[in-house]
Amino acid sequence: MKITVGLFDNMVLQRGKDGRCNQRVEGECAGNVAGPVTMAVSGLPARKVGSARGCRFMAAIKGLPVGGPYTIKLSVGQDSIVVRNVLVGDVWILAGQSNMQGIGYRKDRLKPNPLVRAFYMDDHWDVAQDPLHDLGIAVDRVHDKAAIAKHSGTGPGVAFGQTLHKLTGVPQGLIACAHGGTSMAQWSPSLKDRGGESLYGALYRRFIKNGARVAGVFWYQGCSDTDSPAAEQYTENMRGFIRSLRRDFKNPSLPVVIVQIARLCRANVNVAGWNSIRDQQRLLLTRIKNVLTVPTIDLSLDDAIHISGRDVHRVGRRGAEAMAVLKFRSQKLLPPIQLKRVVVQRDRVAGAMNVLVSFRNVSGSLKARGRAAGFALSDDRVTVAGDVIYETELLGDKVLLKSGLPPMEFGERHLFYGFGSSPYCNITDNADRSLPAFGPIPIFAASAYAPAVIRLQVSALQPSAGRLEALNYPTDLPALSFASRIFDNSSWNFCNLHPELSAREPEDLLVYFSSRVHCEETMKVEVSIGYDGPVKVWFDGKEIYCDPDGINPAIIDDVKLPVTMSAGEHQVIIALGSNHGKAWGIFLRYIRVDVPLSLLRKGKDFYKIPQTLD
C-alpha cells in the first residue's frame, strides 16, 4: 500500500472543534482489490474506516483526540502500511515572499520542539527547524530548485509554531509555501490550474496532499508590489486572494494573519509605494473580515531588506499572538496595536501646534529604548518636512508630538509613522508589539487660514494712553502718520517693533497697526491676534477687543475675534502699548471659518479667503 493524501510519518493532523481529527486519507493498493479499509491505532483493535476499489482506497480517520504520538496501521485485505509518530493539533499555511521564506542568519535559528512539525518543500514531515523553505529540494517546479545560502534560512515560521504551542498546549504543524521575491500577480489564484508550476497551485496542492484541513494562514508579502500600478491594486488583489483561499479551502471564515512589510535600505526607492503598501496592509482588517496585520517596522535587518535572524522570531511570536486572538478569541492577549485617533492641539506656552496620537490595543503602556522615534510630518506625502517634530512624548496609549510649527504652517500636512522605505522606529508596548506603520493621515485645519499679515500700515510712535479701556477709535488717521511696513517673517511672521521701542525705553508709548482686507464674498472670519503688551482692536471702526493687562510673550492665535466680513473692503486697527519697552509687537492673520470641510480637503483653489491690501 502507498498513501498519497492525508497521512504521513511525523505529520500533524488538524483537530476539529471537538478536539478530535476528521481526516480523509487516499492511497494506492498493491493490486486490483475491493473491500474494507481498517485502521488500528497504537495497538488498539482495528475498525473499518473506508473502502478500496481497483487500485485505490479512501478512508477517514475520525475521533483521534488531540495529542499523540500515534502509530496508525491501515490495512486492505492482506496488504497494510504503518504510519508512525503522528500528532493531532493545529496546522497552518506559511506563505508569501522572502521574509516568510526566511533569509535571516541561520546561526540565530531556534532550537526545535518535537511537538512543532513542518511539511518541508520536498513533501516530507519532520520536526520544524530552519530552514523550513529550502527551495532547492522543492517538489513543485515553480520553486525552480533555487539553492539557499549556507548562512541564511531563518524565518518567522518556527517561532510562530512554537508560540502557538505554548499558547494552546497542542501540537503544531507548519506547511511551508513561501517563495522570495514574488508579487501578488505571481500568487494569483487564476493560476491555480497550473498546479505546481504556479505559486497558488503549489500551495493548493500541498493543502490537498495534507488532507485539506488547516487552522489558518500566516502571510508575509508586499515588498514586490511597492511599484505602480501594483501598489494601487494591492488591496483588491489581497481581497481576491483571501476570497479564493476561503473558497478553495471550503472555509469562509479562514483566519489570516498578515505581516506588515518592514524596511528596504536602497537608493532610488519608490517611497510613495512603500508608504502605500504598509498603510493598505494596516487597513486590510477594515476591508476583509477575520484578518489582522502584525507590524514589524521596528525590527533589525540582516541585509538591505530581510529581517534579522534574531528579530524574525519576534515576527513569528507577534503573528502567533495575533492568530490566537483571531482564531481562538484569546482573552489573555490583545490584537495588534491599531491607530485610534489623531488630534491637533495648540501649545499655548510655545504658541506652536502639537499632535496627540491615540492607539488602541496597547498592552501596558508605550515605551522606547532611547529617544522615541518614527513619526514624521509631510506636506506633499512624498517627502518629510524637515525635522519639525522636536519631541515625541509617550503617554500610556498616546503619543504627543511637539512640532514647533506655527498654526499657519500646519493645516495641510500629513502624519506618518514609519515614513519611507527605511525609517527608524523604536516604539513598542510592554508586550513587545510595535506601533503600526501608517500614513499619510491628513491633518486638516478646521478653518481656511489666510497667510500671516506681515505687510501693514504702522503709525509713528505716540505718547502713552495709560490703561487702554478709555482709548477711543482714532478718527483722524492721517494725524497718526501711518507708513507702509513689511516685517521680516523669519520669526513666525511676528510684526516686531523692538528696535524702535527699545530705543525709547523706559518710556511708555503707543503704536497703531492698520490692516486693510478685501473679501470677494461675505465671509465669517476670525481676526486672529497675538500680542505682548496692552492691546485694543477695532474692526471697521467698532471696538471688538481690549486687554489692558496684556504682557509678553506674544503667542500666535492667542485670541480669535469673530467678525462677519461682507463683500468689499474692511479695516482692522490694533493699538499696542509698549509697556515701558517690554512689548515688541503683534501677530495677525485672518481665518475664514465657514468653509465646509469637503472644500478644505480639496484645497485652497476651491474656496475664497480674505486678501490683505496694505
Image (spheres, rainbow, N blue to C red):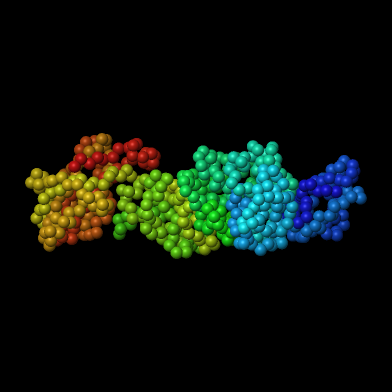
Front one among 611 and 595 = 611
Is 517 placed left or right of 315 in the picture?
A: left
Is 606 placed left or right of 424 in the picture?
A: left
Q: Which residue is located at x 9 percent, y 55 percent?
A: 463
| In the image, farthest residue toward the right | 78
Is 560 placed left or right of 236 in the picture?
A: left
| In the image, farthest residue toward the left | 479
Q: Is residue 154 visible?
A: no
Residue 33 image point, x, y percent: 90, 43
Q: Is residue 531 visible?
A: yes
Residue 136 image point, x, y percent: 68, 50
Q: Which residue is located at x 24 percent, y 59 percent?
A: 553
Is 505 placed left or right of 590 in the picture?
A: left
Front one among 487 and 522 = 487
Q: Which residue is located at x 41 percent, y 47 percent?
A: 383
Residue 149 image point, x, y percent: 63, 54
Answer with the quarter of the image where residue 309 lies: bottom right
Answer with the quarter of the image where residue 347 lies: bottom left
Residue 399 image point, x, y percent: 43, 58
Front one among 504 and 273 = 273
**Image height of 173 relative to 241, above or below:** below
Tell me the quadrant of the picture where the C terminus can be found: top left
Front one among 104 and 576 = 104
